[in-house]
Image (spheres, rainbow, N blue to C red):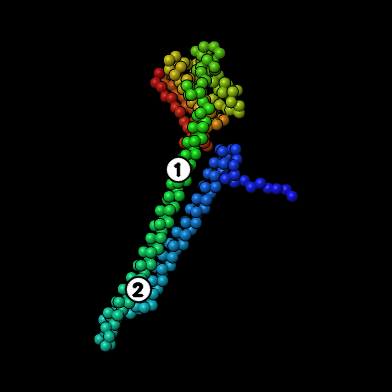
Amino acid sequence: MERIEKSDIFIDHTNVEGRMSLFHNKLKKHLSNEYLFLSDKKDNLENEIHQLEMEQKQKDKTLFPHVEKRDIRKYFSPLNLSQIDEEQRDESKKQFSSNISRINEEIDLLDARMQEIKNFLKDMEDILQKENREEKREKLDQKEICPVSMKDIFEEDFDHFSFCDNLKQIAGYFENKYNPMEIILEFQDNEKNINREVRVNILKQLIANIYLAITDYGISIMLIEGEIMEDNFTLTLSYITDDGPMDAFKISYNIDL
């Protein structure tokens, strides 16, 4: 008979990271289910308040159908009917208010617990994302955030080429080194160039940003677009990430020439 081994977070697995991931998933599922349970309970209590309000209105109509005549009726009775009606009405309202207050207190407790769960899930998600980013960071050279230099990319001096050619060389380097990787270029230099110092600065930043996007967030496609005009230079690096602090990044340079 085939034996099925039970997988649980408390079994002494050697894969600690796998156990923690399993634990986080179970905890997240448990808290999410509890949140849904509390949410349903809150809905039921709110419906109960609505039902009580409807019943109270119906009771008022049934018990006090001729309230406007009570002052006349008291003259034909040895009893003070007006006072009796008022006492009955006050008692009914008191009971109604007591029930509503009790239910609202329960709702407030549920709201507080639901908010605690939401905050805890958010904190847990933030911690996991931070741990993932730090783990990826550890793989980088501690002395240098981006170990890729311009010499690694440009076999000859970079300013022997146009800026558009520089971008093509950068794209080719990262596409070959980090396959599958695609860098889409939509850049026009209009046969113009920019100041060498500015050019070096932009190329170094662009290389570092591309490298970090790939190694930190596993980006496999990005867009570089821009243009060199008579009196202005624009360049924008854009990509989308599913594993980062933001859904999308756009890094832009806009320089007056």
Q: How many numbered tags mark residues here?
A: 2
Quick one: 210 or 36, which is closer to the camera?
A: 36
Decide: is 58 above or below 148. below
Residue 20: x %, y % from top left: 54, 41
Q: Quadrant of residue 233?
A: top left
> Residue visible at 59% across and 38% down?
15
> Residue visible at 49% across and 36% down?
131
Q: Quadrant of the C terminus?
A: top left
Dot 1 amino acid type: Asp
Q: Which residue is mark 1?
A: 123
Quick one: 72 or 59, which is closer to the camera?
A: 59
Gap in Å between the C-alphas at discs 1 and 2? Answer: 47 Å
Q: Which residue is mark 2?
A: 92
Residue 212: x %, y % from top left: 50, 27
Left or right of residue 122: residue 9: right
Residue 227 visible at all:
no
Is label 1 in a helix, a strand or a loop? Answer: helix
Count neighbours of disc 2 (C-alpha within 10 A) and say few if under 14, some if 14 to 19, many if 20 or more.
some
Decide: is 119 above or below 48. above
Residue 22: x %, y % from top left: 56, 43
Q: Quadrant of residue 48?
A: bottom left
Dot 2 amino acid type: Ser
Is label 2 in a helix, a strand or a loop? Answer: helix
> Residue visible at 51% across and 18% down?
149
Q: Residue furthest front?
A: 12
**Circle on res. 166:** none
> Residue visible at 36% across and 74% down?
60
